[in-house]
Image (tube, rainbow, N blue to C red):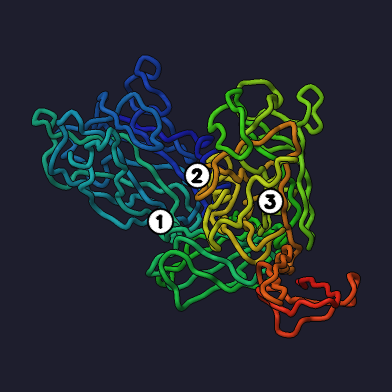
Amino acid sequence: MTAAIVPRKLGVALLLACLAAGSALADVVYVTAMTSNCVSTTTCGSLPNQDVNSQGMLVFNNNGYGAFTTAKATAAGKPNTPGSQYHSNAYSNSTPASGITLAPTLGVPGGVYQVYHVYSSSAGNVSTDIVVGVTNAAGCTLSFNSTDKFQRSYGVAVGGFNTWQLLGYVTNNPGVSNPVITFFYQSGTVSAGANARLVTEVFRFNYYQPCLDIPPVGTTGPLASNLNSVVVTGVSNAATKITVYQDSGSGMQAIGSITSGIVASNNTVPVSGLVKGAQVAATQNLGTQEGCVPTTGLFVGGGANPSVRVAFSLRYDPTMTGPVGSPGTTAGNVYFLGASNVLSGSAPDLGAVLHPSTNWQTVTFTRGDELNPTDPSVRWVGTGPATLGGEYGALDGLAIACEGDTGPFKIYIDHLENGTNGIVQGFEAANNGAVGYQFSRPGGSGTTEGNVLGAPDSSTVTTATAYSGTKSCVAQFQFNSTETNKWVRFVTANNVGATVNPQLQLTEPISIKILLLPPGATPGAPAPGNLTISFSGGNAVINWSGTYQLQSASKVLGPYVDVPGVTTAPYSTPASATEKYYRLRN
């Protein structure tokens, strides 16, 4: 019988693929009992594979103890083979000097490798008590000198798949990458006639580093250059240390750690020197062993709030006939209004670009005349007309796209308006703190959830500021990279307490108020509403909403002075013939 090693070209490909995905060096080498990457004896015959290692030795030498069988396992990563080798009672004569010999070429001289084996015992003719002795014939040391993993129970498939069985560890001698290992008979029954075969099919050598035994952890937002902490996720309750790393161009460097107060799941780690555009990752220690340091991570943003571009996402089907504000279709084609092209990932390529400002900004787009539209539109879901037609559309949501900085973002939204139809949706009817009112959380759309971090991710009614009245919606999120095709589909679907996909008249302008504050700025109080006046007895009674300083003047243009201590309504003052004017100060 013979065996084969996967060609080194495949080994190199596996190594490069794993290096791209993480910091741990990965070298995986397969040794197969039959010719590898072949599924038929018609193509490759039934003889054992005759491949040799870099020293000219057979990578698998059965020393005459074996023959071909069609039995073969199904397992993750296993190379294709036409079958395997079975060994009968002659194998009981094998010794450390004349057993089955493996001689692979491994990638790391002096490295430690895990040795696995997989085979199928589905025919029911494998020994139930065989114990195989193992010896380090040359160039290595072993962590094991025998194994029972060739017994029938270890070749049983579960759910259609066989399991790779860990036999032990081999450590190459310094400077050596061609270990020689011999498997020989130690005890038990080996006899094909007694349905007690020994079967060898595929061995796997995995380069081993202790850090691979430590479960990896993640990071989440917010991540910004003006922050001094990072949230690390997926931490074990047994962790003894958490370390945060940053790659700003010279590889991952530690920027913060904690060794006490660690809890399961999420932990906040103080850091210093977060750099915009750098990548952040983390590790955990179990005992003294640290997990492998990742080579990639999440991008650090420049801080709230960078510029974004905004378009409207509108659904259309011809069955919608109004009125404005009533529930619209949840099906039909979906269009961007304010964009004329769609980028990869379905992002709008155009829209209103908003720069940070302490003032509320109005985003307005008008389809207008269907044959001569004021603003462009483009279909991004469906198979209907390429541009938006008809008189009514349903607001699917806002499309908020990245302009090259991940954020994080904290965006206030108020007053969905529709031309002469007035305000279609505001937030005054909602309770302060209401979650998902009118707009679901930014990460709630399956279309774009892969574009944002797991946190922050919220849509909440707030009294911190408003375009008018006392309430608005505040959306918080962060993109996970800087590409301009990253976007958030901030949808009305699954919202709480408001209309889903409210209908809008496309011949009228559609607008919404947005406050995108500069980094470090705080929202101002909402603008005061109107004063109302009524008379009761000999007094004039003035009313208003909210908490604002009442001021008075004897002339309409002032000067105005505060009415001492009066910030909430009602305010009553004697009616007289003397002219007096009142206003509210924000």
Q: Nearer the viewer, mark 1 or mark 2?
A: 2
Q: Residue at x 41, y 67 (%)?
A: 264
Amino acid type of the residue tagged 2 in the rendering? Asn
Amino acid type of the residue tagged 3 in the rendering? His
Residue hosting label 3: 415
Say left or right for 128 vs 479.
left
Which residue is at the front of the view, 157 or 420? Answer: 420
Circle 2/circle 3 CB separation < 8 Å: no
Compared with 45, 302 (above or below) is below
Q: Which mark sits nearer the N-terminus, 1 or 2?
A: 1
How many numbered marks, from 0 up?
A: 3
Q: Residue at x 62, y 36 (%)?
A: 503
Q: Residue at x 61, y 27 (%)?
A: 321
Residue 214 x, y percent position in the rendering: 42, 61
Residue 494 tag number? 2
The image quarter containing residue 579 is bottom right
C-alpha gap between disc 1 and disc 2 = 57 Å
Circle 1/circle 3 CB separation < 8 Å: no
**Residue 378 visible in the picture:** yes
The image quarter containing residue 469 is bottom right
Residue hosting label 1: 171
Compared with 481, 250 (above or below) is below
